[in-house]
Image (tube, rainbow, N blue to C red):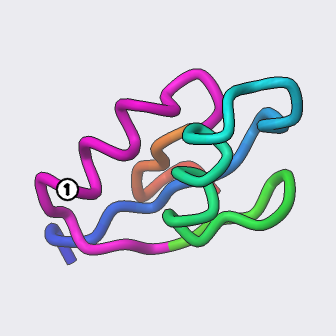
Amino acid sequence: MANIVRVKLVKSPIGYSKDQKDTVRSLGLRRLQHVVELPDSPSVRGMIFKVKHLVQVLDDETA
């Protein structure tokens, strides 16, 4: 399972630019504390980097 990234929305995208809101939605995050599992690819990592102030990348121990 090393090719999976778990991403959690920890801060609301309200008040941020439209492209950041769209990036959060593209990651599949819909509400606060929502966790999604995504393939670990350069494009997903780039989207995470763009909204790193709104999301948290979870490891195996963090739920």
Q: Nearer the viewer, residue 52 or 8?
A: 52
Q: Quadrant of residue 2?
A: bottom left
Q: Residue furthest front?
A: 18
Residue range in magenta is 37-55
- Secondary element at tag 1: helix
The residue type indicated by label 1 comes to Ser
Task: Name the residue rendered at 27%, 71% in the picture.
Answer: 4
For residue 61, above or below residue 5: above
Residue at image x 21%, y 78%? 1
Front position in the image: 28 or 7: 28
Q: Up-down: is 54 above or below 44?
A: above
Count of all numbered marks drawn on residues in the image: 1
- Looking at this view, is 49 or 14 the one in front? 14
Q: Where is residue 11 shown, x and y percent of the image?
A: 79, 33
Camera-side residue of 44 and 21: 21
Tag 1 residue: 43
Does the magenta segment cover residue 39?
A: yes
Query: What residue is shown at x 16% (from left), y 71% (from top)?
Result: 3
Vertical order, 35 against 52 (above or below): below
Q: Quadrant of the C terminus?
A: bottom right
Q: Is residue 56 left or right of residue 44?
A: right
In magenta stretch: residue 56: no
60 horizontally vs 41: left or right: right
Mark 1 closeness class: few <14, some 14–19, many ≥20 residues within 10 Å:
few
Q: Is residue 4 left or right of residue 20?
A: left
* Residue 8, horizontal then vertical, whole percent: 63, 52
Is 46 left, or right, of 19 in this rendering? left
| Residue at the (36%, 46%) spot, across then down | 47
Residue 55 location, x and y as percent? 60, 38
